[in-house]
Every structure is written in structure tokens, then in C-alpha cells.
Image: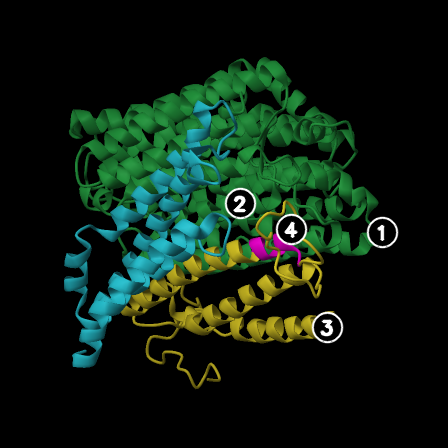
Amino acid sequence: MELLLAITLGILVSTSVYLMLDRNVLRFLFGLVLLSNAVNLLIFAGGRLTAGAPPLIAPGEYAPTGVVANALPQALVLTAIVIGFGLLAFTLALVYRTFMTLGTVNSDEMRIAEPMDDKDPGTGKPGPGRADPQHPATGQEAGL
Amino acid sequence: MQSLILTTTTRLMAALLLMFSVYALLRGHNLPGGGFIGGLIGATAFILYTIATSVSEARAALRMDPSNLAMLGVGVAALGGMGAGFAGEPFFTGQWLFLFQDGDSYVPLSTVLVFDIGVYMAVFGGILTLVFALEQEI
Amino acid sequence: MSWLLVYPILIPVMTAVLCYLFRNTVAGRWISVAGTTALLLASLMLMSEVLDQGVLAAQMSNWDAPFGITLAADLLGGVMVVITAITGLATVIYSLSEIPERLERLGFHALLQTLLMGVCGAFLTGDLFNLYVWFEVMLISSFGLLVLGGTREQLDGGIKYVLLNLISTIMFLSGIGLLYGLTGTLNMADLHLAVRGVENTGLLTTIAVMFMVAFGVKAALFPLFFWLPASYHTPPVAVSAIFAGLLTKVGVYALIRMFTLVFDQDVGFTHTLLLWLAVVTMVTGVLGAAAMNDFRRILSFHIISQIGYMVLGLALYTPLGLMGAVFYLVHHIIVKANLFFVAGVAKRIAGSTDLARIGGLYAHAPLLAFLFLIPAFSLAGFPPLSGFWAKYVVVKAALDLEMWFVAGVSLAVGLLTIFSMTKIWGAAFWPAHPDGIKPRLSDLPVGDRVALMLPIVALAALTCIIGLFPEPFVQFAERAAGQLLDPTDYVTTVLGVQP
């Protein structure tokens, strides 16, 4: 069972890394969502998998009876999910607002805060790394 | 969206959801439930109402800016933690008051409940702030 | 007594709530000032108690360590909280003049107070998962502050800041998950004991490197610093000043805490790695600054190069090295926030932060020019200012270990820092303004002048005091370093038993 979980984790992480290598910020964000889910599973697995009952104490008892699951990782995962939800909701809103303001989700074209005003001395053309305004990088180039 | 079925059922459903959210909030200390889940259920009621009518009507029904409610909730939660200070115990230690004690039946009141109410308000207000903002934008 | 540890977290959260509810009135900003003053008083009380009684610990909700959340303050944690409060107060006063009412109505002061709460929480917590939560509190409010107002530059810088910091957060969280799986505890003091019994030391080193990456992003360590120069020059000056002062230092603090308390098993590998990262960080930062032509962007790159010195102190892992790291942390927060404040005033009266488009500040605002020189010289390490002692101790620690190359690089980086500072001086202060403007401080309204200059004067005075009377501060840093290297006191106080 733990092996299965480990393989699942591996697939999730590799998928998310693939997504995060894209220069489309939205795809990057989806990669982050996947990655945060993978990490939540990792914490869960870190608490060991047991075939136990939910860690609830029956009325009239002072301790759980029988084998119960480890409650701590569940509490940690719950906290992480809530925080992750808040952060990702914020980021999604930020990406949306950025797209509306800058008109692009391509990270190569986001150079407003750090403008590349240095021209290549020989040709007078923009230096390498600068997004060419005449030929903005499109989805096809990014392999979408 | 205008749908007669949705608007009619929403009146009933929203009221039920709000009531259920309070139920979930109150049973939360020893049983599944609590402020967070209660707040989510309560927010669902208003989200449903927003879908059935409009953001402006939902805002009017709420009568209060949801972001103010959320911040107020954070304050209430912190106050709930401060209650322990009067008993000379560390921050967030639960303080209990058992009212109307009669044999086995009593009304338990606690600072834990105050904290949970704060969480309820914070989650309720926070989710609605987000939903209203996104709904208005798109 | 345990409440002393709670106040630095409780006061900002209550202030944030009140600030937000009164954000549409003038009362909001004055509540913010009052709340931060109260925070400063509370932090000073905490500090004096820590000096008096040694390490303090409090168990939240009365759950015994290591099961509940513990707050703990040793000398390093205590002094960081004090510095946080000082920087916070300076920023709030500065923002009275700088932040327009439009941003105040969006909840600027509430976000600022939440940021202070997150920073104080991170310095005081004794629990690893709780540290993660405080990091998130800090991050989400810094996201808000960074893009508040929503100009094109802010959104552009903000998105890089947000995405890279989210990766670091996730890395941190997976490190926590693995560490919990390995040891079964997340209380830092308990971890200190638990890692000694771990058989799989290879995995432990792997986890240590994961933490190094996670905190390295926050601290802007080479090669993970790219988000910092992309974003720090975009928000209002008050915001970049508090970010520059505090946020990266939380990363450095977390590195120091984890790599003295928990990951001290494989020092030969982890700390050597840190050493070389620190050296490269210093060099890249200062070279990046040399290539820039904007007041705030130069300063942003200098944050990176100075982070190198602090991490170098940690990486040397000697009493003198750690002492230098602690001294450097305190000195750098004051100096860097102050330089950003000066940049803000320059922008206000001369119209820009682009060095090609301003000038004449020395002729028309000599007070500002003088107040720029104090933190600038301190940053470069001129005696008798605070930066001299900080650099001296770190370089001395490297020389004691006979690391000539490392010591030589840190001295050369100091020289290049002077080069950058002279560049700012030679473009912004010395020549006449290219548009013929006469940038005078006296043109500002009186209220604005007080709110802008008061924090600069106060922080510059603090730099001078540390520089002229270094003895008590050095002794303090020595004691703090001693506590870090021998955490027996910390562990016994937190766990309440003899280890």
C-alpha cells in the first residue's frame, strides 16, 4: 500500500514539474496545485498508513479504544490544505488580474518591472532574452 | 441566471443551510463539525443565493461587508484565546462554565466556543469576500 | 510570564482587526501607530525578561511539549522581535506620509500589521509546523502589500515573487512531512534530541538540503534569489523598506535556527555547502548591483550580497562566526530599511529613483545627503559605524579558520559595495538635476517632512550608537551565539525536563 502511494506521489510530482517548466504562468500554477496535493499526500504517508478507525473517542471513554489512525498528520494536512487553498485562490486571482492588465500569461513577455533596454552593440537589435514585440511568443512556440 | 425552480428552492435551501451551519458549529467540540465547517456551510447558503439572484442582492441580504465580518471573526477568535488570561493560564487554554447544572444535564459554555464562533465568522466572511469579488469580476 | 511571549503576536493581530474595521477613517492609521508602539514596548519587556532569566518558553493551551504548540524566545529570537517592532514602527510612521488614502482604504495598515504578526510569530515559535503557518501568514500579507494598488510593474514583479515563494513553501512543507516520517515529532527542541537517534543519516542530510532550498529562496541565497530584484523595487517605498529589512532576514533566521538546533549532524557536508553558496551569493549580489542604474534596484541587489555575509557567519559554524551572523542580522535590518527610506525621500523630492533622471540632492537637501551617507558607509563597512564591526567579526572568524580565499572575497565585496554607494552618490547627490529641478526638503509640507525624516534620523542614530558603543552589542551577540551552539538551555526550557 505504501509502495502504491509512493508511486502515485512520484507520478504527481513529475507531472507537476513538467507543467511548471512551461512559460505559460497558468500552466505553472496548475503544476503548483498538483505539487501541493502531492506534498499533502506525502505528509499523510509520513504518518504511516494503518488500517485503523477514525481517531474519535466514544462517549463515556477517555481514550480511543482499539487501533486508530494517526490523527496528527491528518490535522497537518488539513491545515496545509486550507492554507494552500487560500494561497492558490489568491494566486489565481493575481494571474487573472495580470492577464487583464498586461495582456499576457507568457512569463518571457513579463519584463515590465525589469525592462531589457540594453541593445546588442553590433546590430542594434534587442539583446538575447528579450521578447520581440513584433513576434510575440505564441502558444505554438511554447509547444502547447 | 433566471430559473424559477432555482429561485424558489433557494429560499428554502438557504435558510436550511444557515440553520445547519449553526448546528455544525455548536456540536463541533466533541463531534465532527466546528467553526470551519460551519462557516463553509453558511457561506454555501449565500453562494447559492448569489447564483439564484445577483451579487448586489446577496450583499444586501448580508447587510454587512463580508471582509469586515472576516476580520471581526479573527478578533473574536483572538479574544476567545485571551479568555484564559483571566484564569492565569497560558494563551488559548479552554475555560469552561457549566450553567444550570442538574444531575447529568447542563449547558456547557466555553472560550473554545467563542474561538469557534470567531473561526466561523472568519471563514464565512473570507469565502464570501472571495466569491463576491470573483462573481462581480467575471 | 508566559504571556510575554504571546503579546508580540496578539498585539499586531488585534491592531490589524481594528485597523481594518476603521480603514475608511483617519482613526485607522493612528490605531496602527499606537498598536506598533505597544508592540515595541511588549517586545522590549520580553527582551529584558530573556536577558534576565535566559530562555523563555510557553505552552499554548496548556498542552505539554512536544505535543502542543510551544512559543520560545532565546536571545536571538528576542532581539529579532525587538528589531521587528522598531522597523515596523519606522515603516508605519513613514507610511503616514507616503501611502495615499486610496491604499489605506484597501486595508494597507491591516496588511502591514498582519505581516508584523507573521514575522514575530516566526521568530518566537518553537514548532516546525507552526513556523510553516507563520511563514504563510507573512507570505499572504506580503503578497497583498506587494500588489496593493495594482500598477503594471507591481503585477509583473508580484507574480514572480508569488510563484517562486510558493515553490519554496511547498519545498518546506515536504521537508516537514519527511522529517515527521523520520522522527515522529515536529517540536524543534524535541527534534534536536530525536535526530540523534536516526539511523538513516543519508535521508536526514537530504531533508536538510530540502530545508536549505526552502529557506534559501526566502533568504534570497544564490541561485534562488531571482524573485527579489524582480519585485522589491515595484511597491510603495514603505513596503519595499520593510520587505528589505525583515522578510529575507526571516529566511536567514530560519536557516540559523534549523542548522544549529536540528541539522548539526553532518556539518562537514551541509555547512560547507552553505559556505560556498554564501560566497557566491555575496559576489553575484554585488556584481548585479554594479550593473543597475536605479536607486532601489541597486539596493535590492545589495540585500542579496549582504545575505551572503550572514549565511557565511552561520556556515563557518564557530562561536565567532555565529556571533558575526547575529550582529550582522541586527545591523543589516536597520541599515537596509533606512537606505530604502532615503531612496523614497529622494524619489519624492527629485521625482524618480532612476539615477539618470535625478540629481542635485547634495546642493539642495544636504541633510538628506548626510543621512544617506551614514547607512551607506555602514553598509560598506566603514569604521566606526555598525557595519564595520559586523564585517570585522565575520572576516575575523574566516581568518581564524585560515580560510584566506573566503576572507579575501568578503573584503573585495566590501570594496565593490563602496563602488555602488559612490555610484548612487555620484549620480543622485553630487551633480545638478538634469531637469533643473531644485529638490528641497523644505518644499514638503511640515507634517510630511516629520513623518518621512523621523524614521530616517532614528534609524541612522541607532546605526551610530551600535557603531560607537559596540561593546554591549558584541557581548550580547556573543551570548546569543553561545546559546545557539549549545542549545541545552533551550531544549530543557521548552521540554521542561533534563535531556
For the residues labelled 3 and 4, say whether their Cβ atoms are less than 8 Å apart: no
Q: Say which amino acid is labelled 1.
A: Glu
- In the image shown, does C333 or C176 lie closer to the viewer? C176
Chain A on-screen colour: yellow
Instruction: Residue C250: tell me if it is visible.
Output: yes
Question: What's the magenta region?
Answer: A69-76
SS for dot 1: loop
Q: Colour of chain C?
A: green
Q: In the rendered view, would you say C370 is above or below B34?
A: above
* Amino acid type, mark 2: Ile
Relative side of C329 to C163, left or right: right
Identify the element where label 4 is drawn. helix
Callout in the foreground (3, 2): 3
Mark number, residue A1: 3
For label 2, the residue is C304
Frontmost of labels 1 and 2 is 1
Q: Name the residue under label 1.
A: C199
Quickly name the residue at label 4: C211
Secondary structure of the residue carrying tag 3 is: loop
Residues marked 1 and 2, same chain: yes
Q: Which chain is cyan?
A: B
Residues marked 4 and 1, same chain? yes
**Distance Cα–Cα, label 4 vs label 2:** 19 Å
Distance from Cα at disc 3 to Cα at disc 4: 28 Å
